[in-house]
Amino acid sequence: MSSHDPQIMFVFPGQGSQYVGMGSDLIRDFPVAARLYAHASDILGYDLVKLCQEGPEETLKLTRYTQPALLTHSLACLDIFRELTGGQVKPVLAAGHSLGEYCALVAADALDFATALRLVQQRGECMGTYGEGEMLAFPLHLDTVRPLAEQYFCAIAACNLADQTVVGGRGEDLDRLTEAALAQFPRKKPTRLKTEGAFHTFYMIAAALHFRPMLDAATLQAPAIRVLSNYTGGHHDADPATIKTRLFFQLFNPVNWIGNLETAFHDGINTIVEFGGGLGSGPNPEDKRPNLESMIKKALRGSDFSVQHHTAINSQTLRSAAEALCR
């Protein structure tokens, strides 16, 4: 294989990339998506199509609904892409941010759709019921943020980039942390994230303990391709039992997304396809931009690596990505 051959990674976003109207174009344009959404509704026991298309937004933002909605949207995009490309575009690696790690495991044939959907439904219910706290994103390095956060009983929740660190804690603790951080770094204003809890911190330990029996009972097999672990920053072990332990620890440990990206770059990945979700204030699916692209591009700055990113998050971008990669 020459250095010009595509080394492809499929990536999937996590919470925060949901929006009302998500999937409406996919269901309209592609029967494979309509079938997947109908199957998801049967498994979940409620009308997922109506929730995603009509909201209300406050309900869709609840973790117990966000996670099944995003997993279904991401995997509908993946199914459509595979159909449009005739299965010709094959990844060598898959990764996802937080919830997206479950999508990556489906893409790697380690989980089937129904099992993954039930797991994230249960995961979301546990996180919403037993978790607490909020989250705050800092444009600062981990080593700068951690000692300050710990002074206020807050913990690192995600290392997205070298200069983008997410912290979790109780609301009043985050308020005090924000005040202290701005006093030291007045030009580095943190952003409060709209979440139901301090995900990926010790505030999720009870949720993880309640989730573990469901994770233990799930059928999971060795991935057909490599999958990255948010918990370790490296590749998942092929052993299904070990993958389950990593998914358990992921719930109350930081998402090492920059570690995942660095592993992928060193693996020789030169093409990334991002599936599902969308950001932006526009009301329609075609108005949305991908969730992970900006982080990927920032991680590449100043490095010797070069990666081509393809967006596959709505009907329009799916067709464009399929056409570009099948030339």
Image (cartoon, helix red, strand yellow):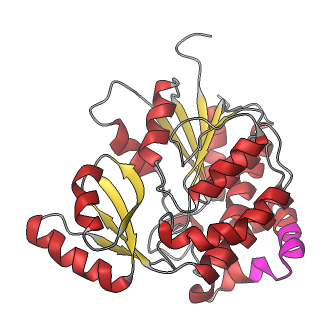
Provide the residue span drawn in magenta.
Answer: 38-50
Direction top: furthest residue: 2
Q: Position of residue 172 (x, y in %)?
A: 32, 86
Q: Is residue 227 above or below residue 77?
A: above
Height in image: 200 above or below 85? Answer: below
Percent across and percent down for residue 265 are 46, 30
Magenta stretch secondary structure, dominant: helix
The quadrant the N terminus occupies is: top right
In the rendered structure, does residue 45 fall within the stretch colored magenta? yes
The one of 286 and 142 positioned closer to us in this rendering:
142
Along the line of sight, the residue nearer the viewer: 211 or 321: 211
Question: Can residue 177 be seen from the camera position used here?
Answer: yes
Compared to 233, does 306 lie above or below? above
Tell me the residue at 70%/45% (across/down): 243
State whether residue 171 is above or below residue 113. Answer: below
Based on the displayed image, in which of its 4 quarters is residue 147 positioned?
bottom left
Residue 140 occupies which quadrant of the picture? bottom left
Report the label total: 0
320 in the magenta segment: no
> Closest to the observer: 239 or 63?
239
22 relative position to 137: left or right: right
| Residue 222 occupies quadrant | top right
- Measured as percent of width and height from the top left, residue 127 is found at 61, 75
Q: Is residue 315 left or right of residue 176?
A: right
Quadrant location of the C terminus in the rendered image: top right
- Is there any visible trace of residue 313 in the rendered image? no
Tell me where residue 301 appears, x and y as whole percent. 30, 37
